[in-house]
Amino acid sequence: MIDTNREMEGRKPAEEGTLDSAALYHSIVDNLPVCVFRKDAAARFVYVNSLLCQLKGMTADQILGKTVEDLVGTPMETADGAKNHEFIMETGKTVEREEMSRRPDGTVQYFQVVKSPVFDAAGKVVGSQGLLLDITQRKQAEAALAYERDLLRSLLDNSPDHVYFKDSKSCFIRASKELCERFKISEQEIIGKSDFDFFKRDHAQPAYDDEQEIIRSGKPIVGKIEREIFNDGREFWVLTTKMPLRSKTNEIIGTFGISKDITAIKRAEQKLEAANKQLLETSRLAGMAEVATSVLHNVGNVLNSVNISSSVVSDKVRDSKAANVAKIAALLEAQAHDLPGFFANDPKGRQLPGYLRSLAEHLAAEKEEMVKELTLLSNNIEHIKEIVAMQQSYSKVSGVVDFMPAVDLVEDAVRMNAGAIERHHVQLVRDYVEVPPVFVEKHKVLQILVNLIRNAKYALDDVDRPDKLMTLRIRRGEQDKVIISVSDNGVGIPAENLTRIFGHGFTTRKEGHGFGLHSGALAAKELGGSLRVHSDGFGKGAVFMLELPCQPKGGKSS
């Protein structure tokens, strides 16, 4: 009895220690941030911690003593969970895998699951146990990262632009498929290389300097046009944007950029610029042709007067009575032996004094008419010289900008069109007011005004009216400008043509080339002015307004 009591007294501390250990174990496991469970050999749950109960939305009493099959219809485990238990019982091996579980609210959770065997004291597998670590956030982060990776991969593989990432030494760490094809290199081979491996130094060095400045300052470069010259001689133009590449700690660790190939655009711009230069030259020549045509018209008109005067003088000389003087002289010589008797007795002698008086009067009148025609002829020749001299004076000042009285420019243009205006019976009205001198190139303004006056004359030719009227006005405009207007009561301009009339090649005349107004508008803009038009419609005339500056661009007139 004594020994039995001693044995019982010895067991009590051991049992109490075991109970304390179990309590400590359960306390630790129950408060772990992981779900813990244990099953017996028959796959019945014999232990679940509180976190697992919370996860499944069930109490421990609802779970303990039941198998997975008993819990069908509850969000407990998948069928794979039961298979894992059988595998562990048969092999004694640990199973590690990821599992998905659906919460009561329908959302999905992901777990890292480790299931291992439970051994008895003899080393026999008597059940299984498991740990479930919630990795939902990690899986979501991985999914987001995979999505971002797929987006980047899609961008790098499919973008027509050149996308690249570089390290702090401006060496490539990633590049798009299009850029690698441009470099004629694979995506793996480009890593670690720099622009110096592909481009001539004229391009590679500035590009490197730009990237190093971005790394130093953190300031991006946006929309820079670069000319790329490859080592093999190929040449391209790109529109480049470069940005600082930052780490998670916001430290600048390199650069990244996008370059858009604009070679086709640049080549088109070059062709357009060449075409524009050619157009300007053509327009300039067209303007010169307008002036030359006016000069030739005026010279032609004066030459008509010269021809008339020449013909009149020629006819006067041919029909002159001066030849009769020689006949009278011969008659007097024949009667030289008895001139008194000839004048007294011969009928011819008695008529001769009266005839001589009449002849003298006729010759005097003839001389007066011939002098008049010769004076007119001389004046017309002088007029031709003036027209040619004026044209030469304008051609010599090409490119020279100076202050000019507006009225002088207008009157010079009128003189060059005077013959056509007179021949077509156009009434010219001058309506000038005093204005400051304009700061212009004389020859350009002359080309514009000559063309406007000629166009007004053509507009008047196209209407059948006796009162053909052309009005020239000079007025002061706004902001130190002078406005010279040429108006007519001619054919007018339809509304649909008002927006097209200054377009290159646009004309309504069969013999027109469409350069005059276009080149005039360009010239006016170059001078710092403008050329505008107004018309109330067909048959209601038109007015063209040339606006010219009174001072240099950015300066003030003196």
Image: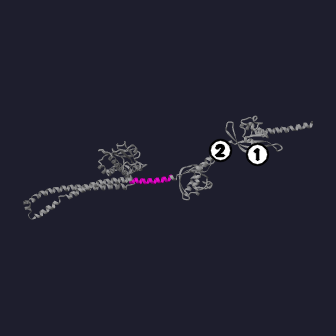
Q: Nearer the viewer, residue 115 or 66?
A: 66
Tell me what residue is drawn at x 42 percent, y 53 percent. Answer: 279
Residue that badge 1 annotates: 94
Q: Amino acid at mark 1?
A: Thr
Based on the picture, tell me whether residue 268 belongs to the magenta stretch.
yes
For label 1, the crowd category at 10 Å Cα-Cα, with few meaning under 14, some 14 to 19 and many 20 or more, is some
Residue that badge 2 annotates: 143
| Residue 73 on image: x %, y % | 71, 36
Residues drawn in magenta: 265-285
In the rendered view, tell whether residue 431 sits above or below residue 328.
above
Which SS does the magenta portion mostly show?
helix
Q: Is residue 55 visible?
A: no
| Residue 260 on image: x %, y % | 54, 51
Q: Amino acid at mark 2?
A: Ala
| Residue 501 on image: x %, y % | 40, 47
Count of numbered labels shown in the rendering:
2
